[in-house]
Image: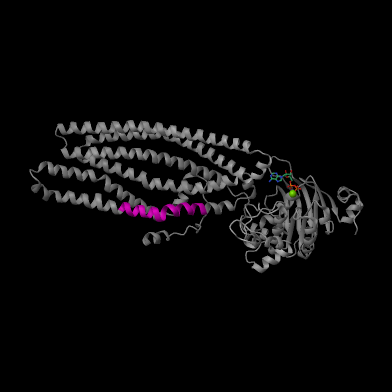
Amino acid sequence: MSILKRLAALSDVSKLPENPYPPRKLLPYILHFAKQQKKLLAIQFTLNGTAALGLAIAPFFLKKIIDIINAAPNPAEAWPQLIHPVGQYVAIALVLRLIAATCYNALNATLFTSTYTHAIRRQMHWYMLRHSLSYFQNDFAGRLANKVFDAGSSLREIVLILTGSLWWVTVSIIVSAFSFASSSYWLLTPLAFWLVCYVFILRFSIPSIRRRSMAFSDARSASVGRTVDAYTNIQTVKLFANDSAEDNSIVDSIVNARTHHVATHVAVFKMKAWSDLNNTLFMGNTLALALYLWTHGYITAGSIAMVIPIAVMLTNQAGWIAQELTAFFEHLGTAEETMNVLVQPHTLQDTAGATHLRVEKGEIRFENVTFRYHPEGDAVLNKLNLTIPAGQKVGLIGQSGAGKSTLVNLLLRFYEVNEGTILLDGQDITNVTQNSLRSSIGMVTQDTSLLHRSIRANIAYGNPMATDDDIEKAARLAQAHDFIRLLSDKDGNTGYQSKVGERGVKLSGGQRQRIAIARLILKNAPILIMDEATSALDSEVEHAIQENLQTLMEGRTVIAIAHRLSTISQLDRLIVMDNGQIIEDGTHAELLRKGGAYARLWSRQSGGFLPEE
Ligand SMILES: Nc1ncnc2c1ncn2[C@@H]1O[C@H](COP(=O)(O)OP(=O)(O)O)[C@@H](O)[C@H]1O
Ligand SMILES: [Mg+2]
């Protein structure tokens, strides 16, 4: 037991290979992962081949034994001659085979299966995290996660089948051919006939099985995606009393998956039926031919005792291999799917020679920026120019859909601009590393989602080095400490240790925002962006936080987006956006005097009263 455990501890699945980028062609994709385990695979290949040889050669020794027994008048005279073939039988068919098979299985159980699967999942996840935001926005999270796991298991099975059953049967056929030939070359004819028919059957069945199983795998992951989507948005589903509509839509996709599943199985059935017929012919032909050859004195009785078990063994293995090959091509289909979905090029990459962003002052400049989400879509930002001097605090205003969030998301380089440049302290953000860019900007997003971890972990996300004291201090500044103290979860965790539910669903919108602000405070970045950061707070709490935010904003460049104008009216400068363009730019007083869009908005929100200064 301890040897097995020690074996299992030999490999480290957390390690990344030298080149962690998987290729985007099927064979190189499979080999990419196989190469990482080439020593182990070579050992497995050898062990399994030895075990297969040990078993396949047994009838050959049996033939020798029977021939000696048959020729000897009594056992006493037979025994001295029997020692040799019996010894070979024991040494190769029993002992060597047993040792090789046991070692092979032990390595599979401890090292190969688990290492291979999990190393691949780990590497795929690494690759996934480097995909752009839009990659994830265009797919179901559940479907993608499913694919990451499928990649591990399908790629493992492919290699396991190749070095396992396929290799086993190949060795068996070769050894059997030698055994047959050692008696009479004529015996090779039924074997060859069987083999040719078998290859034909596989050649015609497998492409159709493969096609169908790919369609099945597609349909299956689509239904997983739908299921996850419904669970994730369960509140919306219930709110609109759409349980049964959702149910139907999932049933549809499950029925669709089943149709493809049936089609796959029917194709498999056909292949099995044909190969069964082929097997039956093989066994019959071999027996008839062997009896004929024996009758005419070409082969011995021992040969008959050899060819029949071989025929039975091979047909048995043929059934097994048909199953294994079907599985093989199913896994090949799945692996190809995972490659097509997951191994898309990373669209937003650090440029070669990207430097580390150095923010000394914090000046932000948008120069002629044009951006559209889809190549054929309308421009969301159109030749936008905006310079925010270091340390300035800017309020961004505009109707929903005006492009405010897009503007700040571009500054974080979540998307690539189509034209123009965005500069931070004079450095083009496409020429600096994404990590250095994003760690220089603290942002509270419009819809804060939290990780399903403890409150503490969520706040410390802003700064993993933060101590408990730092975290509590930040929470107090964000007016979050008081409600955090009272939290508890179903596992009995309380306060900062309590878990928040997936995406933070167990907190109110305002509470989530306060956690996000605490996280922002801990991050201590030179540039702050607040996209509707306090929209879900009641005015009292907002007022309390506002004072702390003022302190936080000191000495930093700030962009604050808000619908509630009172939240941002005192900032240094207000910018009004409409349809992806800046239509007004000035201080609160200037814009009121101007009597344009801002003034109208202000008078609507303040009920027609001018503000008390
Ligand atoms: N991920 C996205 N993919 C495609 N279109 C988007 C995406 N996000 C926003 N948009 C579109 O871009 C426009 C501007 O959106 P946004 O910047 O979120 O506006 P605001 O924050 O001012 O309300 C809207 O028309 C919106 O539909
Ligand atoms: Mg927005």
Residue 110 point in image, percent of width and height:
40, 56
Task: Answer above or below: position of 101 versus 277.
Answer: below
Residue 425 seen in render:
no
Compared with 177, 512 (above or below) is below
Say if residue 422 shows up in the picture: yes
Number of residue marks = 0
Question: Which of the 4 image quadrants contains residue 271?
Answer: top left
Reply above or below: 277 against 463.
above
Quarter of the image where the C terminus is located: bottom right
Name the magenta segment's main secondary structure: helix
Q: Is residue 512 toward the left or the right of residue 339 in the image? A: right
Residue drawn at 46 percent across, 40 percent down: 330
241 or 79, nearer to the observer: 241
Side of 350 where 566 appears, left or right: right
Left or right of residue 595: residue 429: left
Q: Quadrant of residue 242?
A: top right
Q: Quadrant of the N terminus?
A: bottom left
Q: Place residue 254 in its image quadrant.
A: top right
Q: Which residues are magenta?
A: 100-122
Residue 550: percent from the left, percent from the top?
Answer: 79, 63
Regarding ligand 1, which quadrant of the image does it lie in? top right
Would you say residue 108 sits in the magenta stretch?
Answer: yes
Q: Position of residue 191 (x, y in %)?
A: 28, 35
Q: Nearer the viewer, residue 38 or 439?
A: 439
**How far across and down, in percent of the image, does residue 195 sit?**
32, 35
